Image (cartoon, coloured by chain):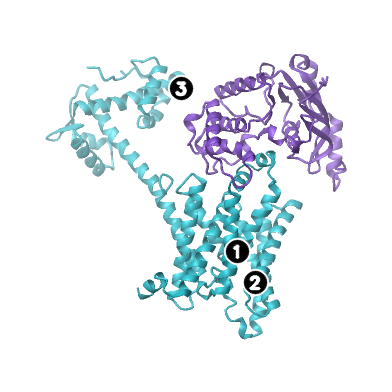
Amino acid sequence: MITQVQKPVLEVHDLTVSYGRNPVLWNIDFTLPKGSLAGIIGPNGAGKSSLIKAIMGLLEINNGYIKVFDQGLNEVRKKISYVPQRESVDWDFPASALDIVQMGTYHKLGLFRRPGKAEKALALDCLKKVGMEKYRDRQISELSGGQQQRVFIARALAQQAEIYFMDEPFAGVDISTENMIVDLLKDMTAEGKTVIVVHHDIHSAPKYFDWIIMLNMYLVASGPTEKVLTEALLEKTFGGKLSLLSDAAQLIKEKGFNPLKS
Amino acid sequence: MEDFVYFFSFQDPNVAMVVAGITLLSISAAMVGTFTFLDKKALLGDAISHAVLPGVCLAFMFAGSKNPYWIVLGAFITGAISTYAIEWISNSTKLKEDTVIAAVLSVFFGIGILLLTQLQQTGDAALSGLDHFLFGNAISIVYEDLMVYGILALLVIICILVFYKEFKLIIFNPSFAESVGLPVKRLKLLFNTLLVMAVVTGIQAIGVVLMAALLITPPAAARFWSNRLHVILMLAVLFAVLSGIAGAFISFAVPHMPTGPWVVMAISFIAFASFFFAGKKGILSKWYNQRNYQQKIHRDHILKSLFQALEKNSKTLEKDEIMEYFPGKEKLTRTYISKLEQENKIELEGEKLKLTPSGLVEAKRVVRLHRLWELYLAQYLNLAPDHVHDMAEKMEHLLTPELEAKLDASLDYPTQDPHHSKIPRDNDL
């Protein structure tokens, strides 16, 4: 059940990805329409995070290609924003909330230039949008998990991108932060921006997303929420791995090299 | 003292040169070190500083003299090879990085010592002072050395300043840095090159073995004082320069004294002092706060015992009765009683103690917090009444007025605790 669209903002074509010799995604092929708020769902180890890391060029691609706004990734980097998992960084790093949000403006500054007044104003505005203006000077290790996630979202807003990829923004945050982020994402997509979110909770998925991508090492489904959220597809996604894929992955692991690499 | 004045008046151009050299290399080491420290790569600095020794010896064998250009080149090459080797081995085997670093460090240093011993056995007169490269001798810096090491250090400093925000980003969040299109791999290569260069600039003045300390200890000390990267960077530079100059001075004042060990002594002293005294993070302040808290507990308990006596319709308590509440702490109790009296919280009538009106307010608050917390545990955490006392005993000293208000509201302003004791209020009779 894969719905392809005309003039997609994101096209993932026959994508195969491995971690070292361990294949994690097999032949993923889907397209996404502009302005969608899309959720990537699937069980642990389904390759949800790997999919957006591969799209961002952070993982080596064995096969296939990705186009954003019908162009290669490097041509459109400034229109793309990536929010990594909160746990992926060391929050003891000596920085304030404002420092982190300003990092969202670095790539537009180029070498030599430091963030100036305009960047600071933008960062403050983004902090305000996530309700964190009070904590601008707070050391980041002193923020709660939900507040740290808000800072990450504010940094993404400061990038002023057209398409956003967010890795588990709702993991380990309080309910008020979760609601605030969902409202913000809905506002963003209403303005024509596209947001793709890795999500772990199947129960809230239909409330949050208008498009759902179901993964289980392969693409089970991709389409409007009401079409894909069926009993049968959920069973395919969460009902255990395809045993042949697991066997093939085991076969590859036993080789001294990765035969999928081209 | 004479030495001190002579040294720090810089009337001797040689002294001025030595100080200029050691200042520059301390700045570059502390700047590179701050990023290395934050990237949790402290051990890498140690490995590089050991791995430059074979390069120094080989350069000497090749050039036949202590020509600084060859020595820097040799040191840089073996230092860079060691960095590359560590990265390559950890990426292509299952060995953990610390294992690889330890192995590479000892192999390179072993070869270095081998070469050094070999050289010294030749008895070449030009060799005298080659062992300075082990522990450093700032005073032996001559003009040509200053030019080579100084320019190298300056180059490192400029690069760090230019790429400040890029280095900050790739250390805090490399995947984000890559996602916005920063050339993360090339920046890391550049940073490793700067790290090797920073070590190389110190080999003559500080020595290969101890150079790692000048990289890592200044930022470690500075981290105690601040939560801001630019402040940490500046403090690290300050600490490094101070200890560098201190080491150079001692080498100058005491003949044949190596510089490196004294620099390490000085910087370690600063680090220990930071550990003890720095703001809220220092051990001293933690001790102090803990002691204050213990005092508050004792004080609260004295007031509470007087209030509980009042509940049993006895307006006063004998001093000895109070002493019995705190066995083994008679002396402390006596001190706090007189303190409370000075603060006008209690009155002494002979040997009898009595709460003053302001003491009564405070005593009520402690008892109220205790009973509110007991009720909270009973209602919200479903604990039986006989399980709630111990925690409440701790919380009564801790809760702030804001939390008290919140607690009170969530319990709907109760009148009784789970043991049916009355919750005292300020407007009670």
The percent position of residue B81, horizontal first and vertical second, equals 71, 62
| Type of amino acid at the residue the image marks with label 1 | Leu
Task: In the rendered structure, find residue B305 and report the number of the disc placed on it.
Answer: none
The picture's colour for chain A is purple
Separation of marks 2 and 1 at Cα, in angstroms: 11 Å
Closest to the camera, between mark 3 and mark 2, is: 2
Q: In this view, which residue lies farthest toward the left?
A: B350
Q: Quadrant location of the C terminus of chain B?
A: top left
Separation of marks 1 and 3 at Cα, in angstroms: 68 Å
Q: Do residues under tags 1 and 3 come within 8 Å of each other at their CB atoms?
A: no
**SS class, disc 1:** helix
Residue density around tag 2, few if under 14, some if 14–19, many if 20 or more, within 10 Å: some
Residue at 31%, 25% (x, y): give it: B367
Task: In the rendered structure, find residue B69 and report the number of the disc placed on it.
Answer: 2
Task: In the rendered structure, find residue B152 and report the number of the disc placed on it.
Answer: 1
A213 lies left or right of B70: right
Q: Earlier in the sequence, mark 3 or mark 2?
A: 2
The percent position of residue B393, horizontal first and vertical second, equals 36, 30
**SS class, disc 3:** loop
The picture's colour for chain B is cyan
| Type of amino acid at the residue the image marks with label 2 | Tyr
Q: Pointer 1 indicates a residue of which chain?
A: B
| Type of amino acid at the residue the image marks with label 3 | Leu
Does residue B276 appear in this view? yes
The percent position of residue B93, horizontal first and vertical second, equals 75, 52
Give the residue at mark 3: B383
Q: Pointer 3 indicates a residue of which chain?
A: B
